[in-house]
Image: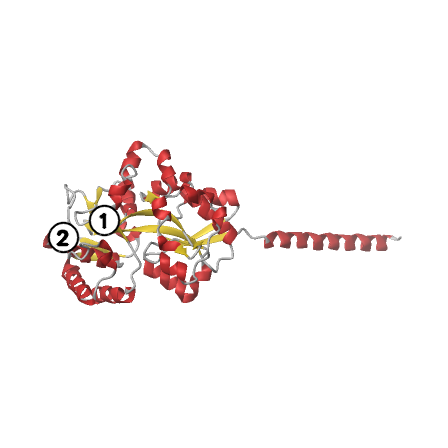
């Protein structure tokens, strides 16, 4: 073999090795890190507990946040369901999602911590359809009054304070049907049956609209996200609002003098579930995520961020006595009596029409 042939031989070998290296590189690149896409309430994808799951499962969590149950339903029914793997519907729409084919039935054998969850929550029919279960209870809590303690040295004891002319332009309410429920409570429509809040008649809804229109001069802004409400307090634009415990927690962490209370009329509240969408292509990873999120240690971390009440009572064993007391885990039954958990609203379109009329009024 002369030098020319030997050189050609080595060139062919070099090209072969280059081709092989390219194939190996392309194969490695094609194995993308799996991504789990979430559509959840604020606070439910905080790095303080999400990063550990990503590291343990060599995946990435990509979270989008919703501002209301109606926003969630609009996205799911608008063809976006396939964009998300895990959602966190509240108790007002969880049943609709479970029965409409938007969620996948769960394999509870892959969620062993399910057995630790509060029986009071898992026994509710919200996400049970025939013999299938479509969601795991995750967190629950109230829609309390959040207030600036410099403006209210004593906690306000009634929703009626929102209508006090003294607070003109200093009130914020949630851009959500919860504000409709609140006005209905002020009018006494929750008596003797709190569930009637979710089944108001046309004349009752008209009275609610009238009551809310009377509130408009006092409303500085209707907040859409928790972060927006927090900013309204920090900029001293408002001194009182219907909010979330998450707002109170974030404000206190920022050094703001925030207080929180449930007034004498009581308040509405929610039970958030985690569900896997029917269109998810990552159902195995999604089941692992649900298991991780309802484990006691994770529930404790979520509570640290949100100040919501965990669905897994075992999380209380990881808390200080003060934390247990603050979350009312030492007296859950009496605390829940003050919270009228959201239910499915069969006439939701009518409620939404009333609320939109209020928002549109000048």
Q: Look at the numbered disc 1 and give the secondary structure of its residue.
A: helix
Where residue 12 appears, as percent x and y from the top left, is: 78, 55
Q: Quadrant of residue 346?
A: bottom left
What residue did someone put label 1 on? 233
At horizontal 73% and vertical 52% (from top left) the residue drawn is 17
> Which of pointers 1 and 2 indicates the residue nearer the eye?
2
- Above or below for 212 versus 45: below
Question: Is 29 or 31 nearer to us in this picture?
Answer: 31
Where residue 1 appears, as percent x and y from the top left, is: 89, 52
- Above or below for 157 versus 22: above
Where residue 104 appears, as percent x and y from the top left, is: 46, 57
- Kindly identify which numbered label has been placed on residue 160: 2
Quick one: label 1 or label 2, which is nearer the N terminus? 2
- Report crowding for label 2: few under 14, some 14 to 19, many 20 or more residues within 10 A (C-alpha): some
Q: Residue furthest front?
A: 130
Question: Is 35 or 299 nearer to us in this picture?
Answer: 299
Instruction: Report the Cα–Cα distance between label 1 and label 2.
Output: 20 Å
């Amino acid at each position: 073999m002369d030098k020319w042939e030997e050189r050609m031989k080595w060139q062919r070998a070099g090209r072969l090795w280059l081709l092989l290296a390219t194939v190996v590189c392309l194969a490695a690149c094609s194995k993308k890190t799996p991504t789990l896409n979430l559509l959840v309430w604020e606070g439910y994808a905080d790095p303080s507990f999400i990063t550990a799951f990503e590291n343990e499962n060599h995946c990435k969590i990509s979270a989008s946040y919703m501002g209301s149950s109606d926003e969630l339903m609009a996205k799911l029914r608008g063809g976006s369901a396939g964009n998300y793997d895990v959602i966190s519907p509240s108790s007002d729409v969880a049943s609709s999602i479970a029965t409409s084919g938007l969620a996948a039935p769960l394999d509870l054998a892959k969620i062993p911590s399910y057995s630790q969850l509060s029986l009071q929550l898992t026994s509710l029919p919200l996400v049970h359809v025939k013999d299938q279960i479509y969601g795991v209870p995750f967190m629950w809590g109230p829609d309390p009054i959040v207030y600036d303690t410099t403006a209210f040295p004593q906690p306000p004891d009634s929703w009626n304070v929102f209508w006090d002319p003294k607070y003109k332009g200093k009130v914020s309410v949630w851009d959500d049907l919860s504000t409709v429920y609140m006005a209905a409570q002020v009018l006494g429509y929750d008596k003797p049956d709190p569930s009637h809040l979710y089944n108001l008649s046309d004349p009752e809804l008209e009275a609610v609209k009238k009551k809310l229109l009377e509130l408009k001069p006092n409303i500085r802004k209707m907040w859409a996200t928790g972060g927006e409400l927090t900013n309204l307090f920090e900029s001293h634009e408002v001194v009182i609002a219907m909010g979330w415990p998450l707002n109170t927690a974030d404000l206190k962490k920022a050094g703001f003098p925030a207080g929180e209370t449930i007034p004498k009329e009581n308040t509405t509240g929610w039970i958030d579930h985690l569900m896997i969408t029917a269109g998810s292509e990552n159902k195995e990873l999604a089941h692992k995520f649900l298991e991780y999120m309802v484990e006691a240690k994770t529930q404790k971390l979520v509570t640290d961020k949100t100040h919501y009440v965990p669905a897994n009572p075992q999380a209380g064993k990881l808390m200080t006595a003060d934390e247990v007391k603050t979350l009312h885990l030492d007296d859950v039954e009496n605390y829940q009596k003050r919270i009228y958990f959201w239910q499915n609203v069969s006439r939701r379109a009518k409620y939404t029409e009333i609320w939109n009329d209020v928002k549109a009024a000048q």
